[in-house]
Image (cartoon, rainbow, N blue to C red):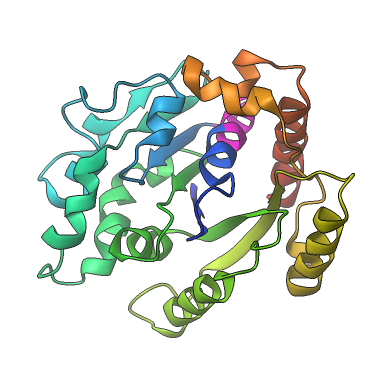
Amino acid sequence: MGKIIAFSNQKGGVGKTTSAINLSTYVALAGYKVLLLDFDPQGNASSGFGFEKNVIEKNAYDLLVGEVDVKDLILPTSVKNLSMITANIDLAAAEVDLVNTPQRESVLRKALGPVKDMFDFIFIDCPPSLGLITLNALVASDEVVIPIQSEFFALEGLSQLMNTIKVIKQRPNLNPDITINGVILTMYDGRTTISKQVTEEIYKYFGNKIYTIPVPRNVKLVEAPSFGVPVAEHAPRSSGAVAYERLAQQFLKREGK
């Protein structure tokens, strides 16, 4: 049985998509079958793998509102064992299109059902919001990974995400079994006092849920999407690549793999 994991934080610019792209890459390179679902209307994860998101005919929008076989949406990437379902701005319309749909929070869970067993992991890159799209992702997921930027506003608004997860757990018709897989510290700079202070606060809040490998600020991580490849292909020896490779190892260890 595959496991579905959402990458979520309603605060933008925290390295959420970067984490989804690169963790999925290194888990796939470790030999596990991975599906990355781009569930953000910005489509940055799709661009990060070189897909022309506005050219692909069927995508995540059709997964939610179209009568389409999910298997027809899955595309291979340049990374062995890693497949993808792309997204573009059309997905934003799904918020409106689903309003009158019965059990609208569970549409994605039903849609992914037929392929859950085809993959070891399905990673979902959520949008930086807590609307109906993110709610669908959380209801469909077994676990949540929360990327947090090691900067002053890191914890701002995080309580809203935690409250949303709490509500989802409390409602039997949504997803009472969802848990927090872990927290990834991103854009970390150990030379600055603020990074250390914020990290201390995050540890107080999440304790052993935090992955002990922080992701440093690294220009190669920023560059890689412009080449349409993950950092493992763009600059495998960079500090960012090494951090995500070690993160993937820690992730798999936690998963008992």
Q: In the image, what residue occupies the spot 36% across and 65% down?
A: 135
SS majority, magenta:
helix
Residue 130, how many percent across, how many down? Answer: 39, 66
Closer to the camera, 92 or 139? 92
Vertical placement of residue 154 versus 67, above or below: below
Left or right of 110, for residue 168: right
Q: Which residues are magenta?
A: 22-32
Residue 138, how many percent across, how many down? Answer: 42, 63
Q: Quadrant of the C terminus?
A: top right
| Residue 36 falls inside the magenta stretch | no
Closer to the camera, 237 or 68? 237
Q: Is residue 257 visible?
A: no
Q: In the image, what residue occupies the spot 26% across and 51% down?
A: 111
| Residue 29 falls inside the magenta stretch | yes
Q: Is residue 190 visible?
A: yes
Left or right of 121, for residue 210: right
Residue 148, how many percent across, how many down? Answer: 65, 55
Q: In the image, what residue occupies the spot 44% across and 36% down?
A: 35
Closer to the camera, 133 or 82? 133
